[in-house]
């Protein structure tokens, strides 16, 4: 699932787009120290866009769960 998940643009300023080949169920973003800073559930789409305007500049881990329970992880850099 990780190889088929596209996250762009990266680095990102305000909005990040996600595109997958399976339905996404939930998206979570964690700060570099492991604190959850964003969560969105019940997506049920192949693509989505999320605003990260409220996040500080830095490196984050994006965690996406597919509808079948598989997880994918991507690093994102917020400018």
Image (cartoon, rainbow, N blue to C red):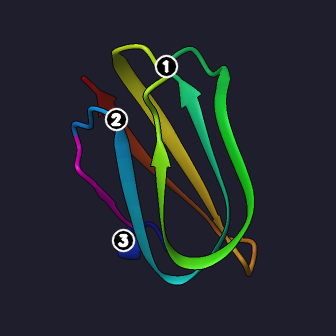
> Which numbered disc, 2 or 1, marks the residue that appears first in the sequence?
2
Return the residue nearer the eye: 13 or 60: 13
- Name the residue located 72 percent from the left edge and 78 percent from the top edge: 67
Residue 29, horizontal then vertical, whole percent: 57, 37
Mark carried by residue 8: none
Q: Specify whether 38 is left or right of 74.
A: right
Residue 49, horizontal then vertical, whole percent: 45, 58
Q: CA distance from mark 2 to mark 1?
A: 18 Å
Q: Is residue 54 magenta?
A: no
According to the image, label 3 marks what residue? 3
CB of mark 3 within 8 Å of CB of mark 1? Answer: no
Q: Residue furthest bottom?
A: 21
Query: How busy is the neighbourhood of tag 3: few (under 14 within 10 Å), some, or many (20 plus)?
Result: few
Q: CA distance from mark 3 to mark 2?
A: 24 Å
- Name the residue located 74 percent from the left edge and 81 percent from the top edge: 68
> Which numbered disc, 3 or 1, marks the residue that appears first in the sequence?
3
- The image quadrant that residue 12 belongs to is top left
Front of the two marks 2 and 1? 2
- Name the residue located 47 percent from the left edge and 21 percent from the top edge: 55
> Which numbered disc, 3 or 2, marks the residue that appears first in the sequence?
3
Magenta residues span 6-10
- The image quadrant that residue 28 belongs to is top right
User: Is disc 1 placed on a helix, strand or loop?
Assistant: loop
Residue 4, horizontal then vertical, whole percent: 38, 76
Mark carried by residue 14: 2
Task: Relative to 29, say whether 26 is above or below.
Answer: below
Query: How busy is the neighbourhood of tag 2: few (under 14 within 10 Å), some, or many (20 plus)?
Result: some
Q: Specify whether 7 is left or right of 36.
A: left
Mark carried by residue 32: 1
Q: CA distance from mark 3 to mark 1?
A: 22 Å
- Name the residue located 30 percent from the left edge and 30 percent from the top edge: 77
Q: Kindly report the secondary structure that dominates the magenta region of the rendered protein.
A: strand
């Amino acid at each position: 699932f990780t190889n088929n998940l596209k996250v762009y643009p990266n680095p990102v300023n305000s909005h990040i787009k996600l595109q997958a080949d399976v339905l996404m169920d939930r998206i979570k973003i964690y700060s570099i120290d492991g604190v959850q800073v964003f969560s969105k559930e019940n997506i049920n789409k192949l693509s989505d866009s999320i605003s990260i305007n409220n996040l500080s500049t830095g490196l984050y881990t994006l965690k996406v769960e597919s509808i079948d329970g598989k997880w994918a992880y991507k690093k994102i850099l917020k400018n």
